Image (cartoon, rainbow, N blue to C red):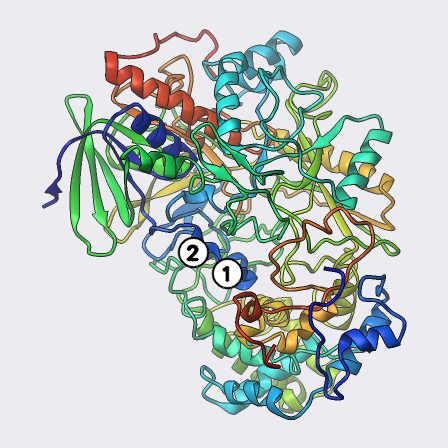
Amino acid sequence: MTEPQQPETTQKGISRRNFMKNTGFLAGGLVGGSLFGGLLTNQLQKPETGTKNATHIVTEARTFFSRGEDFDILSAATERIFPKDDLGPGAIELGIPYFIDRQLTSEWGTNAKEYMHGPFPQTAAVENYENKDRDQNKQGPNADTQVPAPTPRYQTKMTRAEIFTEGIRAIEQTSQEKFKTKFKDLEPDQQDEILQLFDEGKANMNGVNSNTFFNLLLQTTIEGAYADPVYGGNRNMDGWRMKEYPGPRMSYTADIDKDEFIVMKPESLRSYQGNEDEHGH
Amino acid sequence: MAKKLEKVDVVVVGSGWAGGIVSAELAKAGYKVVTLERGKKVDRADYIGVKDELRYTNRYEMMQNLAPETITSRVTMEDTALPVRTRKEMMAGTDLGGGSVHWAGATYRWRAYDFEIRSKTIERYGKNKIPEGMTIQDWGITYDEMEPYYDRWEKTAGISGEPDPLGDKRSSDYPNPPMKESPAVRLFKETTKKMGYHPYQVASANLSQAYTNPDGETLNACMFCSFCTQYGCDFSAKSDPLATVIPTAIKNNCEFRTNSLVRRVLHSGGKATGVMYTDTLTGEEFEQPADVVVLGAFSFTNNRLLMLSKIGQQYDPKTRKGTIGRNFNGQMNITFQGARGFFKEKKFNLYMGAGALGGTMSDFAGDNFDHTNLDFINGGGIEFRQYGHGAIATNNVPDDTPSWGPEFKKNSVFYTNRYMRVWYTPAIMSWWHNYLDLDPTYKDEFGDPLLRVTNRYTDQDRNIAKFGVEKCTEIVKEMGADIVNPDSIPDEFDHIYDGGHYAGGVIMGADPATSAVNNYLQMWEMENLFVVGGSAFPQFAGHHPTATIGALGYRAAEGVEKYLKNGGQLVEAKQASMNA
């Protein structure tokens, strides 16, 4: 288990295994340092052309956001939450905006398995919501009717998909009000300023508090970075590589008691289920 | 109009450990048993090749669909309860095997102290140690009487472990040796040992070796694949009802009917006559008559079915009279607080693990330590668990790191395999103001009222949690973490029901004025109705509950059999002198 099972083809035709050997680093050793880890990842997983990319190019199209402009705002926002850096790719390169687009058409996006019967006390006036300050929330969902005690978070009639559509438009609206510029054209620190307003629940939104939306945006961005690539994010398993996460495996029995840190080449659900991967392995 | 089916000896509601054990035991004894499960039919094949974190952990594949039904929740009687709408906030297991399939596997016996908590607390500290309004009570059964049932369940489940050095007397060892130690578990155990404590390996339903149980069911050795809690085991290496009592029951002609949502217990003249259920695929309604009805579902379901069926007297907090819904308890956001350690120079293979792989100690559990000068009673285990982390879930960063952006990314990646959390699992005591009843506003898909939880924290809860955080912080520091962040103590209940450990409402006891069932889980008010599971806990002990639910399953099965042979109340009621 300490050695990669199969050589990993790169654009240059060098296997990851050979690359590691040649550079004197063994996969089973302490590859640790994130700088080297990031360097390695960048060397090996540059965006490339050819058959490998063709697959995700044809499977990447919007199926939820009808307006390309909405999708661009989403993309810019996720990239600020999870930016590209020397550790590895950011949200856009990982395919996270497409991951979110697909999730919003799923049963999760449409709240198909949530209790959605009224009355719904949540209004835009409400301060604290789902996922926010889980331990210390003292605000009720409706300031008019509630005593100051925590209450179950999700109290809106809106589905998550509807919250996203409203939220993306509210980001653009806030950007226009504050900087008179499109959100996607703002400087990164200006974009952060806008997102911070949503995080703190201080931006204006229809139907829900802006931090209800921000928490969903943050949650799905993280999910898109690290969920199995079958869902459209974590492209090329680069999210997993950054965390030195191996993907689904049958067994760690041989390694569970070992002291040294073990880096394994990640494997996807597709190969775990016994299908060929993109390289024909 | 419901279609009336042929009468059977026993109808069981729910197919988790509680319902599954009762089904297997009565089928083995030769009775005709039908078991009704609201979820779908599943077997091992459903869990092969689906190690998918998003689907199971983040999208709750194995949890009840809340669209037709959930619960409502509030803090005090003056509040308006609101529905717990999303599966992020409300996770209750479903499908064949129930919540017992996605469990982690950590196994603890509850303590002699727990079963006689009121008597033993008064005996050691005097009557004033129990605050007014704390409605803890003895179970009507002692640890010594429970011991054979614990032993039986551990053998059925093939539990792998070593005895708790500070635990109560055992009639035999666990059937299998403890799991392997990982370096992180070793660090916890060696550190706490050096500090003078008594660490041991968490007893585990993830098996340390292949094993055949007394019913002839075979389990495999756990492979530490990490897809354990919130997943079904694809390898029959985590003991659950699908691998043990359900196949045993089926071999003995028990019939499991899935997609069968029980909506009422039918009764006349003070006796249960059967249950009414709806086939969730076709919408058809059926009546299943039976000599004995066993409710072995999740606590919430057991409570709600009694309330909807108008059986027993609803607890009223204003008069403190009535038993159904009394003493709601469980492990909530004030439980599992401790300390988080971040290691700059040390990395652990934390992506490997198993649900119950871990180290624990009972030095601050139950009444193992002197409470004379402490502002709480009872205690809990201190645990380090190596579940095997998922890539989505693992974003542990020191407290001063922002929750998104460049620094978050850098730190969450850096600390992925450099993080250990040690927590306390304190006992949760019962109070007159924490209870269950039916909601006046919100309804299920059939127009029946939802169950309503009213629950708030007390100084007992906050003080015991604070004590635990202090102890865990000392341990994590001693383990050599470079950054140690103690958890903060929540002021109030957050209405998140994501741990599955919610109990009470149909509690056991010796006195019908303060308990709904006797120590065979037989209802005082209806002798052919047995209510089995966490709903019977009068309060929550300081350890995980599953072994106790398993033991109660065996106790109840024995009771049902006695009843089928001889009839009548199996236990003589006692009038307790110390009502809360």
Q: Circle 1 sits on which residue?
A: B50
Q: Is mark 2 on a helix, strand or loop?
A: helix
Quadrant in which residue B175 is drawn: top right
- Inspect the image, locate mark 1, and give the three-letter code of the amino acid beneath it: Val
Per the image, label 1 sits on a secondary structure element best described as loop
Neighbour class for label 1 at 10 Å: few (<14), some, many (≥20)? some
- Give coordinates of residue A205: x percent, y percent: 52, 74
Report whether residue B383 is seen: no
Q: Mark 2 points at which residue?
A: B46
For this view, does B461 lie left or right of residue B501?
Answer: right
Q: In this view, does B324 lie above or below A143?
A: above
* Residues at circles 2 and 1 in contact by the CB criterion of under 8 Å: yes
- Looking at the picture, tell me which residue is in the foreground, B99 or A269: A269
Q: Residue at x 84, y 62 (%)?
A: A29
At x 30%, y 32%, the residue is: B252
* B210 sits to left or right of B285: right
Query: Where B178 sits versus A273, above or below?
Result: above
Viewer-proximal residue, B66 or B459?
Answer: B66
| Quarter-of-image position of residue B317 | top left
The answer to whether residue B21 of the structure is visible from this angle is: yes
Q: Mark 2 belongs to which amino acid? A: Asp
Q: Mark 2 lies on which chain?
A: B
